[in-house]
Image: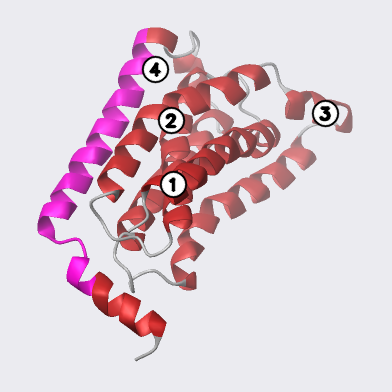
Amino acid sequence: MHTDQLITAIAADAAPSRPFDRSFRYATAIGVAGAGVIFFAAIGPRPDLVAALGTWRFPFKFVITMPLAITATMAILGISRPGTWDKDSSFPLAAPLVLLAIAAVLELFLVPRSLWLVRLIGSNSVNCMTLIPLLAVIPLAAFLAVLRHGAPRDPGRAGGLAGLAAAAIAASFYAINCFDDSPLFVMTWYPLATSLVVALGYVLGRRTLRW
């Protein structure tokens, strides 16, 4: 028996069962609720929220962040079971990013060239880089805690996915406050903030999820 087959066989015996699925749902709920409590208690929505809902750019941010949060969360559950994660499983994670890239190109046609850099830099880049990681702390901790009871074959990747899901959850809340709705801003600063959480999740995953 090859080493990979042996690892898979051992992991199958330790694979998460229904109790793990229930714990994972609880962890997800705790993560979302924790980020929500921090957001509404300390940050809050933008004052012109109703008016922003009447535009296409503001709601579009949630077309990116929420599907990414859902697919990344499901990917965490999948990678916690050795043998159920493969390269094809990462394709749904790319779909929101493709949509964002298309929207960014559309934005270049809709606004004058003189405003491209203005829209990209925006006025909330510092908030974006700080608040998304802050709001991601509880979701990331919840995902890493429950993954310790799973059997991820690649601890680093599992931690990175936990960071991606946590950051996407955080970005979904932060977007309610963010005044910069341009896809150029979202394509630049949201991924940068997310990469910080993904990197942290990867490092923590390698250290805490070994089995």
Q: Earlier in the sequence, mark 2 or mark 3?
A: 3
For this rendering, which residue is in front, 62 or 134?
134
Q: Point out residue 91 in the picture as x, y percentages from the top left corner.
A: 50, 64
146 vs 121, left or right, is left
Q: Earlier in the sequence, mark 4 or mark 1?
A: 4
Which amino acid type corresponds to the residue marked 4 in the rendered image? Phe
Between circles 2 and 3, the one closer to the viewer is 2
Residue 207: assigned label: 1
Label 1 crowd bin: few (<14), some (14–19), many (20+), radius 10 Å: few
Q: Is residue 15 on the magenta stretch?
A: yes
Mark 4 to mark 1: distance in Å?
A: 29 Å
Instruction: Classify the position of the N terminus by image quarter.
Output: bottom left
- Most prominent secondary structure in the magenta stretch? helix
Q: Point out residue 141 in the picture as x, y percentages from the top left corner.
A: 35, 34
Instruction: Classify the position of the C terminus by image quarter.
Output: bottom left
Which amino acid type corresponds to the residue marked 1 in the rendered image? Arg
181 vs 43, left or right, is right
Name which residue lies at 56% across and 37% down: 194
Name the residue beneath numbered marker 2: 136
Residue 117: assigned label: 3
Q: Is residue 54 on the magenta stretch?
A: no
Name which residue lies at 66% across and 30% down: 182
Which amino acid type corresponds to the residue marked 3 in the rendered image? Leu
Tell me how the rendering is colored: secondary structure
